[in-house]
Image: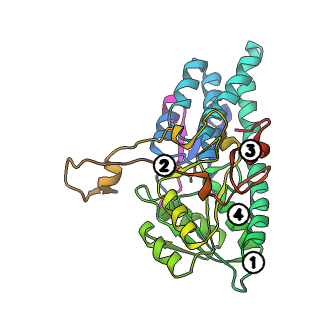
């Protein structure tokens, strides 16, 4: 697979941050070269690169790009950090590379920023592997053994496209498959930008996961029919009280899961936990353009000028979260004290 995000140096026409353009998947596997920070900020806003952990990497490499070009690093860091407001990893990634740049001697500062971004990249890959292991262990303890395996439902996209490694929730699903315990992955299409339909099905097919795509509003009848053993999702920010912001449509799944007695499991690195955001209500939810809801692709299906509500994320309260799987271990049941016990300490992205 084309690298989700990589650094290109002068030997191949860089400096540049090179992305696998996720707006073009699944039909086209194309690189998108970002040769300066405005280009990278545009790619982040358009969701050419998306998903919390890899946004942290984009932020860190973006700072390295500004430094390598001799552009204003402080201004670039500010623009990158504000490109999207909800995933806290973006800000962490920017801060990590900026701190390395600031701490270095002037002649070494660009290399220091790049070194920090590379370090973060490697840490993120290790975090994916650790989350996959912890997640599988959790599911094994939580779910009754079924001869045919588990039926897991996911929302949005949380695989290798969002990470320096295998991802978050989808990495756990893949571990379950490898262990011979996955009967079926139910993939929510994830309106309005179809990250499930476009990206998760693409990854699931590449990994050989048995999977079925459904319209988001078909999930309820699946639960009612007893066809869902657990829900696994990622997160863009977890506040100090354990509230989880994730792709819009996650909260209704948590309500359904509670009603039907099904575990609702969140998988995210500790870099997604934000001790500076006290409660779920404090998480800034990105509002996106009306056109994402009024049409798909080239066609518009809603009347021109209709008022639109298009939040990119929603917030699930801690009491609906059965467990949070991190690379450091699992928090469950979710509450502020348990969360702090697992997540306090030095962070990666
Ligand atoms: O708007 P997106 O596509 O960036 O939203 C991504 C999600 O909501 C993911 O579920 C989240 O970042 C977790 S991925 C580890």
- Is 59 covered by the magenta stretch? no
Distance from disc 2 to disc 1, alpha carbons, whole Å, reads 33 Å
**N-terminal-most mark, 3 or 2:** 2
**Image coords of residue 154 (percent x, y):** 57, 65
Q: Is residue 55 visible?
A: yes
Determine contact: label 4, label 2, CB under 8 Å. no
**Which residue matches tag 3?**
337
Mark 3 or 2: in front is: 3
Distance from disc 3 to disc 2, alpha carbons, whole Å, reads 25 Å
Q: Residue furthest top?
A: 106
Q: Is residue 36 visible?
A: no
**Which residue matches tag 4?**
172
**Which residue matches tag 2?**
313
Q: Residue furthest bottom?
A: 147
**Image coords of residue 241 (percent x, y):** 64, 43
Closer-to-camera residue (255/164): 255
Q: Magenta residues?
A: 26-40
Q: Is residue 51 above or below residue 209?
A: above
**Which residue matches tag 1?**
180
Res 346 quadrant in image: top right
Q: In the image, is 196 to the left or to the right of 161?
A: left
**N-terminal-most mark, 4 or 1:** 4
């Amino acid at each position: 697979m084309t690298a989700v995000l990589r650094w290109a140096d002068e030997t191949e026409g860089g400096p540049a941050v090179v992305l696998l353009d996720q707006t073009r998947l699944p039909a086209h596997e194309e690189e998108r070269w970002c040769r300066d920070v405005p280009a990278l900020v545009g790619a982040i806003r358009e969701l050419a690169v998306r998903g919390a952990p890899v946004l942290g990497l984009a932020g860190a490499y973006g700072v390295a790009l500004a430094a390598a070009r001799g552009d204003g690093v402080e201004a670039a860091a500010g623009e990158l950090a504000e490109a999207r407001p909800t995933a806290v990893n973006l800000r962490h990634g920017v801060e990590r590379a900026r701190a390395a740049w600031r701490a270095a001697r002037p002649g070494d500062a660009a290399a220091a920023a790049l070194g920090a971004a590379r370090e973060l990249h490697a840490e993120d890959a290790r975090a994916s592997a650790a989350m996959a292991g912890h997640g599988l262990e959790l599911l094994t303890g939580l779910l009754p053994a079924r001869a045919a395996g588990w039926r897991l439902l996911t929302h949005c996209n949380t695989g290798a496209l969002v990470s320096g490694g295998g991802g978050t929730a989808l990495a756990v699903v893949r571990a379950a498959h490898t262990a011979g315990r996955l009967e079926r992955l139910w993939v929510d299409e994830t309106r309005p930008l179809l990250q499930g339909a476009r990206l998760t099905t693409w990854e699931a097919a590449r990994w050989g996961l048995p999977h079925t795509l459904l319209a988001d509003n078909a999930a309820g009848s699946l639960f009612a029919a007893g066809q869902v053993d657990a829900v696994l999702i990622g997160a863009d920010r977890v506040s100090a009280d354990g509230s989880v912001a994730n792709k819009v449509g996650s909260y209704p799944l948590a309500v359904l899961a509670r009603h039907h007695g099904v575990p609702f499991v969140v998988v995210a690195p500790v870099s997604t936990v934000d001790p500076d955001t006290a409660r779920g209500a404090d998480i800034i939810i990105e509002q996106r353009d009306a056109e994402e809801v009024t049409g798909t692709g080239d066609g518009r299906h809603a009347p021109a000028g209709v008022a639109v509500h298009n939040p990119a994320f929603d917030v699930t309260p801690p009491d609906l979260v059965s467990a949070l799987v991190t690379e450091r271990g699992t928090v469950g049941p979710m509450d502020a004290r348990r969360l702090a016990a697992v997540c306090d300490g030095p962070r990666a992205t």
